[in-house]
Amino acid sequence: MASYVTIKSNALGIILKLDNKAPIEDVLREICHKFASSKRFFGSAEIVLQIEGRVLDDTELNAVIQSVEYNSDLKVSLIRIDDKNKGKKYLEMLMGDKEAFIDNNFKIIYGPIEEPEINSDVSLLVLGDVPEYTKINCAGNVVIFGELEGYVNAGAPDRNQCFVVAHDITAEKLSIGAHECDIPHKKRGIFGKGKSNGSVIIFEKDRFIMNDFGNIDLNKHVNKRRGHK
């Protein structure tokens, strides 16, 4: 598989060399994956981020910055493009669709999970189980390739059109946006091993709906918040 992103370091921070022909969505996805998988290596610091190889408009540049920051403990204090510096005030002025960015970009967590609390400013992808002692606070959607035993707060604090997907849900409660629900015991393990690809929970028309994954049109559900028909 071709790589669209090359990461290098210099005395001031990080250089991102981006493929100039690949779809920007693929480039952003690879940035998210590379920084999430190397989070401990990069550590925590304020950095100068240098972009090479591709011309970005303001929305794309904002998406690149957030892909780095949301998937690491790094903070971008300065952008360097074509030997020109752009400061934090400029970064804060970048315009973009925040709702779409939260929904379409994922912080990746690799199991097994040991932390008592996980926070994400975008959507969250968990590759493993979420144990009973873990609480997840997430601004976007939550997708779990494993069992959900802990507590999930998706769409925090008030994004009610978010969703939770898991291979198995044995948690007692969860919340979406500003609403919390008890998960009936009869629903626990509803999919059964080998009988389903997972379960999805949404909040719609003032009630929670739980169904097998694939039986709910998630694109239609999410687009309601953005005013799409």
Image (cartoon, helix red, strand yellow):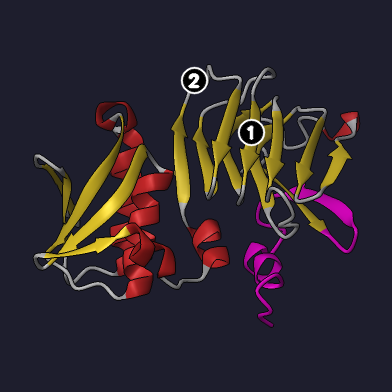
Residue at x 78%, y 36% (from the top left corner)? 190
Mark 2 crowd level (few <14, some 14–19, many ≥20, 10 Å Cα): few
Query: Do callouts 2 and 1 mark residues in contact (Cβ within 8 Å)?
Result: no
Amino acid type of the residue that numbered disc 1 sits on in the rendered structure: Ile
Disc sitting over residue 112 in the figure: 2
Residue at x 53%, y 65% (from the top left corner)? 98
Say if the magenta span includes residue 175. no
2 or 1: mark nearer the eye: 1
Amino acid type of the residue that numbered disc 2 sits on in the rendered structure: Pro
Mark before the other along the chain sequence, 2 or 1: 2
Q: Which residues are magenta?
A: 204-229
Rounded to the nearest whole Å, what is the CA distance between mark 2 and mark 1? Answer: 14 Å
Say if the magenta span includes residue 213. yes
Q: Which residue is mark 1?
A: 136
Residue at x 64%, y 38% (from the top left corner)? 137
Instruction: Give the camera-side residue of 81 and 52.
Output: 81
Taking 163 as reference, is 187 left or right?
Answer: right
Mark 1 crowd level (few <14, some 14–19, many ≥20, 10 Å Cα): some
Percent x, y for residue 138?
61, 43
Image quadrant where residue 182 sits: top right
Placement of 69 over or under 203, stated as above or below? above
Percent x, y for residue 4?
19, 57
